[in-house]
Amino acid sequence: MSLNHLMQASAAGDDAALIRYVRLHLGDGNEAGGRAEIDKAWIVALKALLPDPPTDYAFVRKLVAERDLATLAHLFFYVHFALVAASETWIHDGTL
Amino acid sequence: MAPSEQLRPDLWTTVNERYPGSMIRKSDAVALATLGVPLERARLCFVSSAGVQPIGTLPFDVAHPLGDFSYRTVPSNAVPSDLEIHQLKYPSAGATQDLNVIFPIERLQELVAAGRLGSLTPQFFSFIGYNMDPVRFERDFAERLAAAVHAQEPDVALLAPA
């Protein structure tokens, strides 16, 4: 879906089209695959925290407080891929 | 990953349905330029959308939902072990084993050594093809890339999609 179509969907409040695009992107063109990848990333994130390891919460607070929304959104997409890469069930053909 | 395990069967036959507006139809194609010198004396510049880049350069942004509108320069005298691929949108297992199947840098070097091709520009160019803004791609990125290629003073440019 091109930027023009996404902008039109956003202006029309067509959230279904927007999330479909996200799933297509994360699933390399396979919407169901993308949905599964989103779930996978959250499972990896939760499992990483279950042992309750020390984390840099101050860094997280500082990052979110100081960075603009677009950069955080960009990070959100990147972290998704980083988490699924850590899952050891990498479905993509290439590398980050 | 075996081909049968790929998540995207039939992607390319349904790409316009899945990504509406991302395919460009051109009715005002520019005529190809005539090669002014024989290939044996021509200086060639290679341009690829395979996401190949020198190790140590900033990896292409494969996470951004709209794609990456930047290019990398690749020294034409590089060897495959100097280079790596950063992309997610095409099967690259074969290219990882032998970069020349997608980015034939050694084949081009061999053609020069054999006298079949005059020379190579000092720099080649690479980018990723996942760009979801066709207008920006054509009017900004392609213009910047064309200027960079032109600055290498090639007689001929070889364009290869991934």
Image (cartoon, rainbow, N blue to C red):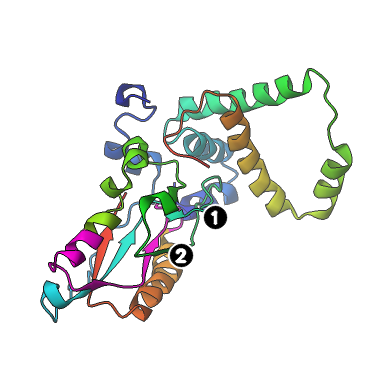
Q: Is residue B24 magenta?
A: no
Q: Position of residue B52 (x, y in %)?
A: 41, 53
Q: Please give the count of numbered marks on the rendered protein.
A: 2
Q: For the residue carrying disc 1, how many other residues have a C-alpha within 10 Å: few (<14), some (14-19), or many (20+)?
A: few
Disc 2 marks which amino acid? Arg
The mark found on residue B136 in the picture is: 2
> Which of the two discs, 2 and 1, labels the residue nearer the N terminus?
1
Classify mark 1: helix, strand or loop. Answer: loop
Q: For this view, does B152 lie left or right of residue A69?
A: left
Q: Give the quadrant of residue B45.
A: bottom left
Q: Residue furthest right?
A: A58
Q: Which residues are magenta?
A: B109-133
Q: How far is mark 2 from mark 1, CA to CA?
A: 27 Å
Disc 1 marks which amino acid? Gly
Residue placed under numbered mark 1 in the picture: B56
Residue B95 seen from this side: yes
